[in-house]
Amino acid sequence: MHLRRTLVKRIRVIVLAIVSAIACAGGLALVAARPVAADPVSRIAPAAIEVRARPIDVFKPGEPSQFRFGSLVFRGGLALTSSAPDFGGLSAFRFDASGQRFVALSDHGNWFTGRVVYADKRPVGLADVKTGPMLDQDGAPLAAKGWFDAEALAIDGEEAHVAFERVNRIVRFDFSNGVLAARGTPIDVPPALRRLPFNKGIEGLVHAPKDHPLAGALIAISERGLDKAGNILAFLIGGPRPGMFTLRRAPHYDVSDAALLPGGDLLVLERKFSLFSGVGIRIRRIPQALIRPDAVVDGPVIFEADLGHEIDNMEALEVHRGADGEIVLTMVSDDNFSPIQRTLLLQFTLLEP
């Protein structure tokens, strides 16, 4: 029995690594695995959808009594499914201050809004979920002109910024009339950002709040745009000290998202897909004082997991304070619109030093 479980796990590692590598290298090559509406114009109107949730009570199967993983304590999770053809491919996820209402986006260039339902601090479902396409300044779907690979989201009040891979652009949206009605306008970005490798563009996008030393800046981190030393390219756009910095890269790991802690430190979510070393994720904590133009930044790993845990292609990371003051981390996976991958929502409490 043990040999059978080991074989099944190894097959899953290989299949997931191949699928994820194809999706990352060829973009939406796997989208056809799930039918989507053929006419983008027919999907301009926002629509309510039903999302089913299966609870995940144990993060490491076979170890039901283990809840601490590095600096994180598992609170609970959900495996999400929907018959709505556009659901899936979630690449970014942001909460409001309550940690209940959320805005998410997908590889197809769609918004998702809704509410996470809790029971005793554990997520138990999603409610009031709606979806609609991201619109350009004329009200047409951005996907219709090839701007669909939305990968990162930063929100500041009623203003949001979305990073699109492939075209290597950042688009500003005004949420004052609602998320699903928002229209987008591209902003000026550094020339080096426009030159990032195809499908290796911005994956982490964070807005520095007014009490942060970089107040007003967008912190934008690429998936795997590398400098000559092999470090990951990142940008400070706007704010008091615009410029470039780099994140020291670990072998096989690429950036998939980022989020700021209340104290100002930066959390960077990273993932790896390898036929030899397997599939894994980790989170690094970067001290805020290190982030400045021309710096090479690094920080301790506070969390690691592999396919021995309940993970998939984890692409989104968010931070909020719970009602009791705890710092809560939420991770969401991108299923690449593939039937062999899952859309997961996982929540943890951060144990501060």
Image (cartoon, helix red, strand yellow):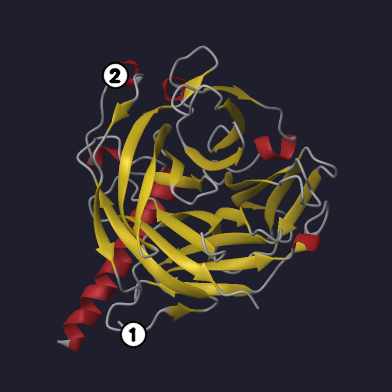
Q: Residue at x 46, y 67 (%)?
A: 348
Label 1 secondary element:
loop
Q: Give the total number of marks visible in the rendering.
A: 2
The secondary structure type at the circle numbered 2 is: loop
Q: In the depicted view, which residue is nearer to us: 87 or 351?
A: 351
Query: Is residue 68 among what the camera can see?
Result: yes
Q: Is residue 278 in view from this perspective?
A: no
Q: Residue under circle 2? A: 39
How far from the left and from the top, in percent, is residue 97? Answer: 55, 48
* Callout 2 crowding tier (Cα within 10 Å): few <14, some 14–19, many ≥20: few
Residue 65 is marked as: 1
The answer to which quarter of the image holds residue 36 is: top left
Residue type of the residue flagged with mark 2 = Asp
Q: Residue drawn at (43%, 63%), measured in percent from left and top?
A: 347
Of circles 1 and 2, the one toward us is: 1
Q: Is residue 132 above or below residue 294?
A: above
The residue sitting at 25% across, 26% down in the picture is 37
Left or right relative to 126: residue 75: right
